Amino acid sequence: MNFILYAVPFFFVLIAVELLADRWRGVSNYRLADAINSLSTGVLSTTTGLLTKGVGLITYAFALQHLALFELSAKSAWVWVFAFVFYDFCYYWLHRLGHERNILWAAHSVHHQSEDYNLSTALRQTSTGFLLSWIFYLPMAVFGVPLLVFVSVAALNLLYQFWVHTRHIPKLGWFEWFFVTPSNHRAHHAQNALYMDRNYGGVFIIWDRLFGSFQEEDDNEPVIFGVTTPLASWNPLWANVQFYAQLLSDARRTESTWDKLRIWFMPTGWRPADVAARYPLSKPDLSQFRKFEVALDGRQQWYIAVQFTVYIALGSYLMNLADSLPTAALVLGWSAVACGLFVLGVALENRPWALKLEVLRLALNVPLVWLAPLLGLWPASAVGWVGLLSYSLLSGIGLYCCRNRLTRLAS
């Protein structure tokens, strides 16, 4: 059962509830651009996962068949309990090394880039984590945890982590000793030195207490969210490649062949000595911290928000029909999502070329109308033609209404 698919509507309902709680308490934990950026990385991660989920499943199934020491049954309740706890233990080490090794941080850093902290942050996920994360769950296959059980407890673990991304829930007394909570997870998302690289558990905080990585949220040290090398962008594609690009740049610049290779596996923040000397990276002074912001007119914000809902819908469509769609259709759907989210990210940053790129995005709907049915993304029908072209026309009208403001603010 795909628990995540069924949970998606509840995610958005709870985000709406949190927005109401913000208003009731007179606080503002959401910014439109930041929330769209977080949700965009989530949509991109989900649609990318439709193409890459086989990596983890195939490797797990292979290990289960050839390396399993025991044959556990999915019909046994204790197997499910064992697997749930064991999964979180494996997740702890994946998460911890995700903060401690450059190559793993390059993937995981996406989740930490937001300088706000709210339920939309929970949906901010990497699109490249599939490359190495599967390694950390192979011990479960060696112990014989059935594939169905593994997939199910993985989804439950991820679902649990959604609710802890809020600022509205205080410390929870005895619960804090055993489970991950909003309080100790807020500390995990901080860039303050006190909280840096702490509280890695997904469900159970006991791993952090056992292995010396726990840090309680301190009322005297307000949490400053984000990463020490700010993303300074609203683009979900750049969010996924930013740290890879930094590592690649350092590897290219260093004169040491050994450093070119080992930089990827060194502790987070390690740089070749010659590169660090010639190209120093300045860390922001948290006492002067300012969130990344780009001025946007109200009409622009509404236009981008409405356009973003189209990609929420397209991502949901792909999730619902992924098992019945041919690979070519999934690739086309992913391409449409990635292209659209990239363009909206450019618009959120109010780049000088945002208007031209948006016109191009809408123009690409014409070949999409022809190509999508051909590859099986959706059935060929007059309704599809009329619907997509009408959407493009209405979007063009909306874009025209924003045209002068876009041009003036970008100049």
Image (cartoon, rainbow, N blue to C red):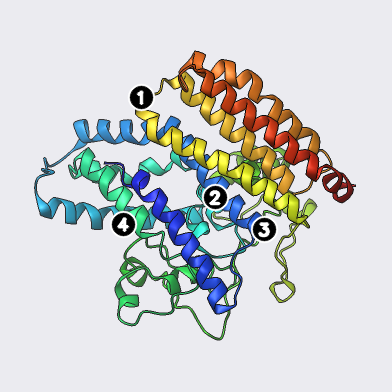
Q: Amino acid at mark 4?
A: Asp
| Residue 156 rendering spot, x and y as whole percentages | 30, 53
Residue where numbered disc 3 is placed: 229
Q: Secondary structure at mark 2?
A: helix
What numbered label is drawn on residue 324?
1
Residue 263 in which image quadrant: top right
Q: Amino acid at mark 2?
A: Leu
In space, the residues marked 2 and 4 are separated at their CA atoms by 25 Å
Between disc 3 and disc 1, the foreground one is 1
Are dots 4 and 3 in contact, CB under 8 Å? no
Residue where numbered disc 2 is placed: 39
Earlier-in-chain disc, 3 versus 1: 3
Earlier-in-chain disc, 4 versus 3: 4
**Which quarter of the rendered picture does the N terminus lie within?**
top left
Residue 211 in which image quadrant: bottom left
Earlier-in-chain disc, 2 versus 4: 2
Depth check, front residue: 113 or 27: 27
Q: Secondary structure at mark 4?
A: helix
Residue 310, placed above or below residue 93? above
Q: Secondary structure at mark 1?
A: helix
Q: Amino acid at mark 1?
A: Ser
In space, the residues marked 3 and 2 are separated at their CA atoms by 21 Å
Direction from residue 344 to residue 44 in the image, left or right = left
